[in-house]
Structure formats: C-alpha cells, structure tokens
Amino acid sequence: MKIIIDAMGGDHAPLEIVKGALAGQKRWDVEIVLTGDKKAVWEAVKSCGVETLPRGVEIVGTSETVEMCDDPSTVFRRKKDTSMGVGLTMLRDGKGDAFISAGSTGALLTGATLLVKRVRGIRRAAMAPVIPTTTGKAVLIDCGANAECTPEYLVQFAYLGSFYAKRTLGIEKPRVGLLNIGAEDSKGTALQKETLGWLQKAGAEGHLHFIGNIEAKEAIKGGCDVIVTDGFTGNVMLKSMEGTGSYAGSALKAMFGKNLLTKLAAGLVMPGLKAFKAELDPNKVGGTAFIGISKPVIKAHGSSNAEAIENAVLQAKQFALSGIIDDIEKNIDLMKVEKE
C-alpha cells in the first residue's frame, strides 16, 4: 500500500506533515511518497532526527505550492508543478493507492475532480466527516459549504453516505436521515421537501434504509447513521458541535477547579473526560474522505499536526481497502433521479 502525501499543504507544513507521515509509515506498515519542495522536505525529515530516508519513504520534488488564496478553479492551470497537483496526478496514474493533503479544501476537491476524476455517473463528489454521537458515530455527508445543492445531489449523497457507513463504520443497514428543522414532511425549504420525496421513494423500494427528516439534536443523540445535508447547513452543524465541545470543556475545567473537593472529584472522572475530549479532537480522526472520486482522496484539516497526519495515513489505508468505490460503481443506476 502506497500513500501519497502533500508535504506542503496545511498551516504547519512541512514539518508536522513530514513528522506525521514518517510516524504513519512506521505504525501502519505502508509506503509513503512525500510531494513538495525537496530542500524543505529534507530539512523537515532531518528535524525529525532522521538522516537517511527510511525504506518505503520517497520524496518527489516540486517547485510550487497551492496557497490558500489561490483560486481553486484556475490554480492547476496556472501552476503546473504544485505538491498537490503532482500528488493527485500520481494517484491518477496508479503511482499510489491514496492521496492526503491538508491544503485548501476547494483546490483539493477541484483537483481531485479534474485530475483523478469522479466515478462515472457521479454528479458531484461529497465530503463525509465522521462525527461522534451519544450512541456511537455517524457520517455527515454534503458537497462543501460553498457549493450549490440540488435534490439530485442530495439523493446521490444519501447512497454515498450509506455505502461509506457500511464500509467504514461496519453498519450492515445504515439509517439515513435528511437534516431538517423538524421531522414532519412539511418542514424545510423546497430543497428539503423535494429531496424528501425522492428519498422516501428509495426507501419504499428497499434501496436505502431511509428514516425521514431528522433534527440536528436527534442526529447528535444517535438518531441515524448517515446525515444527509446541503453543505452550508452541514458546515454550520459541524462548527456548532466544535464550539459546544470547546465550551463544555472550558466549563467543566472551571467547575472542577473551584476547590479541593471538586479537584478530587475531577480525578475520579478524568478518564471519562479525556475520552470525551478525544471524541471531539479532529487530530484523532485524521481527515475527511471525498466520496465519489474514482480513487481515495483524504482532506486533512488545515491545522493538522503530526498526530492528525499519522491518523490520516490509517484512514487512507482503510479507505483504499474498504471496497466503497466498487460499491458506488455497481450501484450508479440506483442513484439517478428520473424526473417525469
């Protein structure tokens, strides 16, 4: 298994990216290809206390980097030798089994679509972060915060999310819910109402285990395994969860630090608190998969540290071995919305 990593993408590149890649290569038993400025990558390798590249680690030199300010729609035409573009091209050409980048989300999705290509028949690739719930985990699937959504896209996302939950979370029959402001069929905008009808049809025909509309509060309680949503609403939900987790952590810290008695109580519940914090820590997950691209592409968050990249390597390996792309290719016809 060979994982290609954009060494120049992210707020802490290349040092944290390289450090995480080296740790991931050793821990998860994979080969690693680092793309980026050869001198900078080598300096990062040496900063990790490594003077000679370990067996199974390779550096592919590039002369340019995708910056956060670059226009995703034009960057790969203007810059032909970026660490992201070269890595995606290598993936397309079969020189690796998966690709990871902590760089610009828009540029990575555009590059994956233009260079690696979508699975034939997929209208738009989707992002599928796995989020914690009170009963386990769920896949939140959308097309990105700034992308326009249609019922056709959301129906595809429901299938993509179901395949992903089955393959990555091990759920044989994932419950699919449409994120809305209420459970009633009359709730939501025209987008939610039309999408609801198509998903109900898919559920009635036995193609999806669709449970209907679901509110965010019920989704977080574990009310479904796949949360289908437009990108804007999904992003607001994710950011709200992150903020709530941060607030809860600060509030608990202040509560347990009041006096000796509360400090003693904190010692008793500390293992549970640490586990709760880990559930909300993006570094423990590694990244988010792009579902619908013909080969595995993982978006690590922009502030990824070495731990995040190490875990992203595992995520990329598992995704490459999961068989989800085969599932998508075999079921394309089911995802089509045929309007009368």
Image (spheres, rainbow, N blue to C red):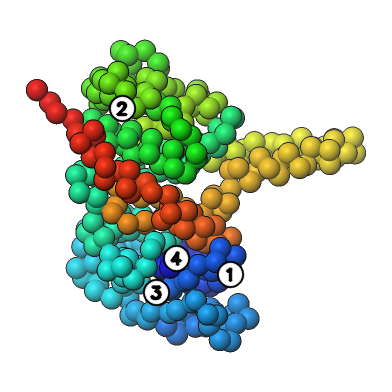
Q: Callout 3: helix, strand or loop?
A: strand
Q: Earlier in the sequence, mark 2 or mark 3?
A: 3
Q: Which mark is residue 26?
A: 1
Estimate the spatial distance between the alpha carbons at disc 2 and disc 3, rounded to whole Å. Answer: 41 Å
The kind of residue tagged 2 is: His
Task: Tell me whether circle 4 and circle 2 mark residues in contact (CB < 8 Å).
Answer: no
Mark 2 — residue? 207
What is the quadrant of residue 19 in the picture? bottom right
Q: Image quadrant for the N terminus?
A: bottom left
Estimate the spatial distance between the alpha carbons at disc 4 and disc 3, rounded to whole Å. Answer: 17 Å
Q: Is residue 33 visible?
A: yes
- At x 76%, y 42%, the residue is 271
Mark 3 — residue? 35
Residue 340, image x and y in percent? 9, 22
Q: Is residue 206 left or right of residue 286?
A: left
Q: Is residue 303 above or below residue 168?
A: below
Q: Is residue 147 left or right of residue 99?
A: left
Label 1 vs label 4, nearer the camera: 4
Q: Earlier in the sequence, mark 2 or mark 1?
A: 1
Which of 62/251 is in front? 62
Task: Tell me whether circle 2 and circle 3 mark residues in contact (CB < 8 Å).
Answer: no
Residue 29, image x and y in percent? 55, 66
Which of 104/318 is in front? 318
Label 4 vs label 3, nearer the camera: 4
The kind of residue tagged 4 is: Met
Q: Is residue 329 above or below residue 94?
A: above
Residue 199, image x and y in percent? 29, 24
Q: Earlier in the sequence, mark 4 or mark 2?
A: 4
Q: Which mark is residue 274?
A: none
Mark 4 — residue? 1
Q: Is residue 253 above or below residue 4?
A: above
Q: Is residue 327 left or right of residue 166?
A: left
